[in-house]
Amino acid sequence: MMQWLRNLFAWTWRVLTTPAATLSLAFLTLGGFVGGVMFWGAFNTALELTNTEEFCVSCHEMKTNVYEEMTRTIHFSNR
């Protein structure tokens, strides 16, 4: 049983570290994870920046009556 486990570990290590064409599977997995975290951070930052009243007013005209109407909607009270 112990020999089988060692062989499995050795095979797994070889698959993860042996170049597949040009890059190893471990490097590609780590790169995908890091790229995903960077994309998530950039996407979240963009959402936070565009979720402000100042951003909306930069394109939309907010006269007194529209602003008063907006204060009674979920968009105004949304944190």
Image (spheres, rainbow, N blue to C red):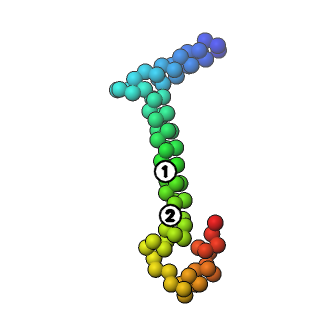
Picture disc at residue 50: 2
Residue occupying the far left of the picture: 21
* Mark 1 Cα-neighbour bin, 10 Å: few <14, some 14–19, many ≥20: few
Position of residue 2 in the picture relative to residue 60 (left or right):
right
Residue 66 in the image: above or below residue 59: below
Residue with the mark numbered 1: 42
Residue 33 in the image: above or below residue 39: above
Instruction: Check disc 1 and report its element: helix, strand or loop.
Output: helix
Residue 77: % across, % down? 64, 73
Instruction: Check disc 2 and report its element: helix, strand or loop.
Output: helix
Q: Which quadrant would the C terminus be assigned to in this image?
A: bottom right
Give the residue at x 49% y 68%.
Answer: 55
Q: Hey, what amino acid is under mark 1? A: Ala
Give the residue at x 59% y 15%.
Answer: 6
Give the residue at x 46% y 22%.
Answer: 17
Residue 18: % across, % down? 43, 21
